[in-house]
Amino acid sequence: MIRTTVSLREDVYDNLRRLAAAKRMSFSGVVNVKLAGESFSLSENEVKQKIKESREFFKKLAKSTPKIDPVKAVREMRDERLKQLVGE
Amino acid sequence: MAKFVVDSSVILDWIVFGDDDKMLVHKLIEQLISKEIELVAPGFLIVEIINVLKWKYSYSQKKIEFVIRHLEQIGIVFVELGREDWSGLLEAEYKHNLTSYDAHYALMAENGGLKVITRDKDLLKSGVGIKIEDVF
């Protein structure tokens, strides 16, 4: 690790500080993850929440989706495009 | 961490039949979110999902946007094939007697020593694919 001094904009500093508190990480830890383009690991509760949201999202979606077999739909889509290309 | 390629049949299954709690795809996605497994797919999958949702399931533009954003958020890693991959694609197509579309998945799987989770009979027959039931 290298210790250095940088000047941050106030809003950037505030956001990073809040993020560090929310993730229970050090300020340096958050800056490193952000600058390295890595993703933060989720807490157990965050994982559960994300799974719940995802399940609800797709449940709602599926209720308004026609029950056409996806394998058949994909095949038909590809075949139709091919027919268009060869001018049938 | 176990890693698999996932194809459009599995993702569409989730979209179409996601209201059935018994679907194994729920378990797959839960494992993805909790980082027990890793799922990768060719960027081409997004094109195919958009195409099918628009033309076969009559989804609106906004609804499709929600779906794609959600797929990105849950952590499926999309990898673009480059121009230099054409010979590998061709080889996979002839080796497994697949369409170019399916060869995308086959190539990605073979490059990474992975299996493709799929419901598609051609990919399963080729030996590249596995059924979702066989993942758990």
Image: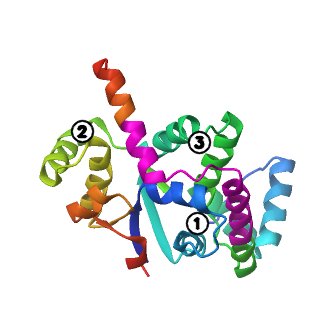
Instruction: Identify the main secondary structure in magenta.
Output: helix
Relative to A31, is B31 on the left or the right?
left
Q: Which residue is mark 3?
A: B57
Q: Are marks 3 and 1 on the same chain?
A: no
How many marks can you see? 3
Q: Are marks 3 and 2 on the same chain?
A: yes
Asked whether A10 or A75 is in front, the reply is A75
> At which x and y percent is residue A21?
82, 71
Query: Is residue A39 in view?
Result: yes
Write down the chain letter for disc 3.
B
> At which x and y percent is residue B45?
45, 47
Asked whether A28 or B108 is in front, the reply is B108
Write down the chain letter for disc 2.
B
**Image quadrant assignment for residue A26:** bottom right
> At which x and y percent is residue B10?
47, 60
Residue extent of the magenta highlight: A50-78
Q: Is residue A77 magenta?
A: yes
Distance from Cα at disc 3 to Cα at disc 1: 54 Å
> At which x and y percent is residue B75?
56, 61
Asked whether B37 or A23 is in front, the reply is B37
Residue at x-position 32% and y-position 53%: B105
Of tags 3 and 1, which is closer to the observer? Answer: 3
Q: Which residue is mark 1?
A: A2
Q: Are marks 1 and 2 on the same chain?
A: no
Q: Check residue B84 in the rendering and tell me which mark sits there, or answer none.
A: 2
Q: Amino acid at mark 2?
A: Glu
Q: Is residue B60 magenta?
A: no
Distance from Cα at disc 1 to Cα at disc 2: 39 Å
Q: Amino acid at mark 3?
A: Tyr
Mark 2 element type: helix
Of tags 3 and 2, which is closer to the observer? Answer: 3
Q: Amino acid at mark 1?
A: Ile
